[in-house]
Amino acid sequence: MNNRSIKEIKETLNVLLAVGAVCAVYAVLHVFGITCPIKYLTGISCPGCGMTRAYLCLLKLDVYGAFYYHPLFFMPPVVLTVYFFRSRIPKKVYKLFLLTTAVLFVIIYVVRLFSPYNDVVVFRPLEGKAAELFNLIFHGGN
């Protein structure tokens, strides 16, 4: 094995470890009733909101439900695969892919945020723990 392949293996393991760590943190938070730390703190859904529920639907082979909870549910595995093979992809193509993915997530997020028919993505900043803490500090909890 040459130094480059050893470096790639270490990098791949680091990415898989990071993904595993994030999953573990989410599992622990879920036990305490916190399904999304961003929404819990801010009261505002993030662009990935609904992704976990989408994957739970996929486990039941409910593609319609998965699409309902997050229309881009198929993208994280694609992004991860592209990331692992990025050394074989021209840099411009790789960067364009990442930019396109980010733009798609933002567009879908904004559409879902302002859609009156969407109950997955919410904007309720007064219900977040940060607002509660602000209220407690500056208004004595009233």
Image (cartoon, rainbow, N blue to C red):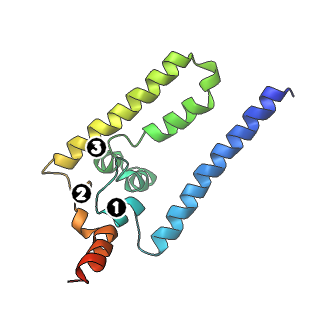
| Circle 1 residues within 10 Å: few <14, some 14–19, many ≥20 | many
Task: Kindly identify the amino acid type of the residue bearing the numbered disc 3.
Answer: Tyr
Give the residue at mark 3: 109
Query: Would you say 129 lies left or right of 92 here?
Result: left
Q: Which amino acid does the dot numbered 2 rest on?
A: Val
Relative image position of residue 96 (x, y in whole percent): 44, 22
Q: Are marks 2 and 1 in contact (CB under 8 Å)?
A: yes
- Mark 2–mark 3 Cα distance, whole angstroms, equals 10 Å
Residue in the image at 54% along x and 63% along y:
25
Percent position (x, y) of residue 41? 36, 65
Could you tell me how far apart the alpha carbons at marks 1 and 3 are, in whole angstroms?
14 Å
49 horizontally vs 114: left or right = right
Q: Earlier in the sequence, mark 2 or mark 1?
A: 1
Q: Is residue 85 left or right of residue 121?
A: right
Q: Residue at left 66%, top 51%? A: 17
- Badge 1 amino acid: Lys
Q: Quadrant of residue 80?
A: top right
Badge 1 is on which residue?
39
The C terminus: image quadrant: bottom left
Q: Which mark is residue 14?
A: none
Looking at the image, is mark 2 or mark 3 earlier in the sequence? 3
